[in-house]
Amino acid sequence: MLYKSSLEGISEKMLTGFFVGWPNPPAPATHLKLLKNSSHIVLAIDEKTEQVVGFITAISDGVLSAYIPLLEVLPDYQKREIGKQLVSQMLKQLEDIYMVDLMCDKDLQPFYEKLGMIKSTGMIVRNYNMQSGK
């Protein structure tokens, strides 16, 4: 597995199969756009197929705070510690930032706790009619 923090050589064709279970999933073009607009990314690439099989994004002010909105690994590649590697590499990129926040479902909290994150509470708004992006 190749891990990289740039979009060099990444095309829409390499970003298929993500957002499983989303009622209105972003198209690969929108996925590429959100990666480009993120302040930090880490991609997991299967070197045999040259497909992106996992990704994590962060948005940061570069001073005190960062937010990790997305982490996803394709279903066929789960349970191989790819998600763990993506989070670890992202936290390494953000090690000079005071607060790194992430919201997740309760059943995912143990995964993040194993990686050194602490449970917290938060508030959210979900505008589902915009789930596939602009």
Image (cartoon, rainbow, N blue to C red):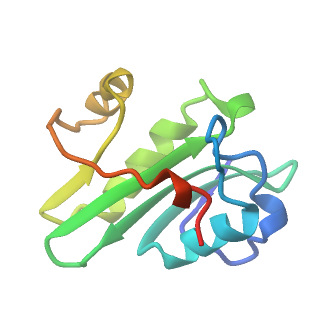
Image spot of residue 17 (x, y percent): 76, 45
Residue 96 in view in this figure = no
The residue located at (26%, 29%) in the rendering is 113
**Up-down: is 45 above or below 60?**
above
Name which residue lies at 32% across and 33% down. 112
- Residue found 86% across the figure and 48% down from its top: 48
Q: Position of residue 130 (x, y in %)?
A: 53, 61
Q: Foreground: 85 or 39?
A: 39
In the rendered view of the protein, which quadrant contains the C terminus? bottom right
Number of numbered tags placed on the structure image: 0
The vertical placement of 37 against 42, above or below, is below
Furthest-front residue in this view = 129
Residue pictured at 36% horizontal, 30% vertical = 105
Q: Where in the figure is residue 92, as x and y percent of width and height?
A: 33, 57
Q: Seen in the image, is 98 located left or right of residue 31?
A: left
Is 28 drawn above or below residue 119 in the view shown?
Answer: below
Q: For residue 58, which quarter of the picture?
A: bottom left
Decide if residue 93 is on the left or right side of residue 11. Answer: left
Quadrant for residue 75, please give it. Answer: top right
Q: Position of residue 83 (x, y in %)?
A: 51, 39
Residue 61 makes an appearance in the image? yes
Left or right relative to 98: residue 128: right
